[in-house]
Image (cartoon, rainbow, N blue to C red):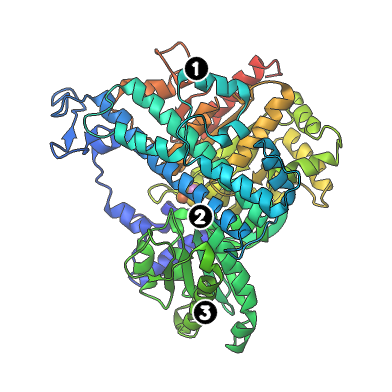
């Protein structure tokens, strides 16, 4: 078993790993060590278990079978498996989007206890969607917007409304020419599941096109739609100060951990935690402390300043403090291992969705209609469990750190307007032209219990910042950067002189010594915010996003959603780095289509869209490769290298 310091660079997590081991409790880090005999066929993507003729495995050294029983070769099998992975990611995000649409619809029809929080965003969406708002009330406008969103799950011809709303026209024309435009999210997901099934699509190039269609579903019905309508319902984030790391758990408080993704639940838990404050006092607690994990954490951090305890790989460790009274989850990135750890303490793990249940958890069904009832029950359960704590087993790491989050496009433009009222993007673009901001890299995706938690995410970011690259972060990668000070004003210590100067100037506009050089842009669906920012800059310069000196990097990735998001960035012509090998090595055709440059190998992503996949496990080499790509794009755009 590897030592705690080999598993994570987060001291608090190390401390809790030691405690867990002392108490005989197993976590994901131990399970990763125990399951280290990984299947080579699976890792290269050449295992097909799509039907009962198999599983068929294609030989990796040419000495065994070259075809499955049905005749499928390595290229088809790898492409099908990759399509299946991207579909999983896109389905997760699209269902997230649809849940938010239904919440909005119910809210404006008086069937769910939520209100419109950002009218300005609502009206701008309505106008983009071509809705005539004359004579309509705010709720009627919202209803029309929600119905337009629902069309993206229903229509049988045309193109996703949200794609037309958000994408650059020139890029859409490229996708149209290639025949990859999605009609409706559910239809494309069903079609993709069918085409990768036994006896259907076996042409790897055609399957790759299928992957791109599904990637667009992920981007528009998943990311963009979710963020847009969440902002309408809960407000567009603005700069907010908060804290990170396990030290945000407070001994004298009732602690509730919110984990998962859709803020429809976490927002209500925060609301009810405030409402039941008095009852916590009656129990002798100082109040109720909500802390976040994964993207539920990101959502309530961005809008409410709720502190974040930790990210994906160490999600079980807050419970090991012995001071988490309830852990409430909705969907995605939730380890079933949570209930085993919680079973060793007084902690209640609460599942809330009818299709996400975990043995050992208490299920309190949550739906928008009954949101208040459910949230009240959840918080009351936490109050109840608080009284069952074993004080002797409580140990909370002291380590915590300040963070500034809330970088929505609205926040960023608002800030830049203080420098240039008419053309807010001008100062940003000028800094990019001068090289003070050499490029922008989106640091996104997960942490992975197999790799050293937070290490590669922070190393890539620090190397890039030293070279004046502005970092924009989401998901668990943002958590990594926040935990290590890169999302606070002190983060400028890691910057090259140009980037430092820009952040100090911008910081002065909000009474901070500097703006953090890594901007927290939110949850995984909020990669849409990054896309929106890049499009704004590209539009300002009159070019496509694919020509900007920007890239995306996911050094510690693991989730199919992250693969879907990466594929989406590729459709925009943005270079994408991953630090964990995707299972495509068994097919030269598929690997080269993703990773080869234009003109180097038949049809490639770079040839089609202008960006490619970079697979590199070493964070320093990865950062160097990203810089080299940014450098090329700068030159092509006529900027200094
Ligand atoms: Ni998004 Fe990755 Fe975190 Fe889950 S929450 S673990 S997909 S980055
Ligand atoms: Fe997420």
Q: CA distance from mark 3 to mark 2?
A: 22 Å
Left or right: residue 12 versus residue 615 is right
Q: Residues within 10 Å of mark 1 (few under 14, many from 20)?
A: few
Q: Quadrant of residue 207?
A: top left
Q: CA distance from mark 1 to mark 3?
A: 56 Å
Mark 1 and mark 3 lie on one chain; the one further toward the N terminus is 1
Q: Position of residue 270 (x, y in %)?
A: 60, 68
Left or right: residue 378 versus residue 516 is left
| Residue appearing at x 48%, y 61% in the figure | 13
Describe the element under mark 1 as helix, strand or loop: helix
The reply to whether the residue tagged 2 has its Cβ within 8 angstroms of ligand 2 is: yes
Between 639 and 494, which is closer to the camera in this rendering? 639
Describe the element under mark 3 as helix, strand or loop: helix
**Disc 1 target residue:** 177
Q: Quadrant of the C terminus?
A: top right
Mark 3 and mark 2 lie on one chain; the one further toward the N terminus is 2
Between 48 and 235, which is closer to the camera in this rendering? 235
**Disc 3 target residue:** 380
Left or right: residue 282 versus residue 493 is left
**Disc 2 target residue:** 261
């Amino acid at each position: 078993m590897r030592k705690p310091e080999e598993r994570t660079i987060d001291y608090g997590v190390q401390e809790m790993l030691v405690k867990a081991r002392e108490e005989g409790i197993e976590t994901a880090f131990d399970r990763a060590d125990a399951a280290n005999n990984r299947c080579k066929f699976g890792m290269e993507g050449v295992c097909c278990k799509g039907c009962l003729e198999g599983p068929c495995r294609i030989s990796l050294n040419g000495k065994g079978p070259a075809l499955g029983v049905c005749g499928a070769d390595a290229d088809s099998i790898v492409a099908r498996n990759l399509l299946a992975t991207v579909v999983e990611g896109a389905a997760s995000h699209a269902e997230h989007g649809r849940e938010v649409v239904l919440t909005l619809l119910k809210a404006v029809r008086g069937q769910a206890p939520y209100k419109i929080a950002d009218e300005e965003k609502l009206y701008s969406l309505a106008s983009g969607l071509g809705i005539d708002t004359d004579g309509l009330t705010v709720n009627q406008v919202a209803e029309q917007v929600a119905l337009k969103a629902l069309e993206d799950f229903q229509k049988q011809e045309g193109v996703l409304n949200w794609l037309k709303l958000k994408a650059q026209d020139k890029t859409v024309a490229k996708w149209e020419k290639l025949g990859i435009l999605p009609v409706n999210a559910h239809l494309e997901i069903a079609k993709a599941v069918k085409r990768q099934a036994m006896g259907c699509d076996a042409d790897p190039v055609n399957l790759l096109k299928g992957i791109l269609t599904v990637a667009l579903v992920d981007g528009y019905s998943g990311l963009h739609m979710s963020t847009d309508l969440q902002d309408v319902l809960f407000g567009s984030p603005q700069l907010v100060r908060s804290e990170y790391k396990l030290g945000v758990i407070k001994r004298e408080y009732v602690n509730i951990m919110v984990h998962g993704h859709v803020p429809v639940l976490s927002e209500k838990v925060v609301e009810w935690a405030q409402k039941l404050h008095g009852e916590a006092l009656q129990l002798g607690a100082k109040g109720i402390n909500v802390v976040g994990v994964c993207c539920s954490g990101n959502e309530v951090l961005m809008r409410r300043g709720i502190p974040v305890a930790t990210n994906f790989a160490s999600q079980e460790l807050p419970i090991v403090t012995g001071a988490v009274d309830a852990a409430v989850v909705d969907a995605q990135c939730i380890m079933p291992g949570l209930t085993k750890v919680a079973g060793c303490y007084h902690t209640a793990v609460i599942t809330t969705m009818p299709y996400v249940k975990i043995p050992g958890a208490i299920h309190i069904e949550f739906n928008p209609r009954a949101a208040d009832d459910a949230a009240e029950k959840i918080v009351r359960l936490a109050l109840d469990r608080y009284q069952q704590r074993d004080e002797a087993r409580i140990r909370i790491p002291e380590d915590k750190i300040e963070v500034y989050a809330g970088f929505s496009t609205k926040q960023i433009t608002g800030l830049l307007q203080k420098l240039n009222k008419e053309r807010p993007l001008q100062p940003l673009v000028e800094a990019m032209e001068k090289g003070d901001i050499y490029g922008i890299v989106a640091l996104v995706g997960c942490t992975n219990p197999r790799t050293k938690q937070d290490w590669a995410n922070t190393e890539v970011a620090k190397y890039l910042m030293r070279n004046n690259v502005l970092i924009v972060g989401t998901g668990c990668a943002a958590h990594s950067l926040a935990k290590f000070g890169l999302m606070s004003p002190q983060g400028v210590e890691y910057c090259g002189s140009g980037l430092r100067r820009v952040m100090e100037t911008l910081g002065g506009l909000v009474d901070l010594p500097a703006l953090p050089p890594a901007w927290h842009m939110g949850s995984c669906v909020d990669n849409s915010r990054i896309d929106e920012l890049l499009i704004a800059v590209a539009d300002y310069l009159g070019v496509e996003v694919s020509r900007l000196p920007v890239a995306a990097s996911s050094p510690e990735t693991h989730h199919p959603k992250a693969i879907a998001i990466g594929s989406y960035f590729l459709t925009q012509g943005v270079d994408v780095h991953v630090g964990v090998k995707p299972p495509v090595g068994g097919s030269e055709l598929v690997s080269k289509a993703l990773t080869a440059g234009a003109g180097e190998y038949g049809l490639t992503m770079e040839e089609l869209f202008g960006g490619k996949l970079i697979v590199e496990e070493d964070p320093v080499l990865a950062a160097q490769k990203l810089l080299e790509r940014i450098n090329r794009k700068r030159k092509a755009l006529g900027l200094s290298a």
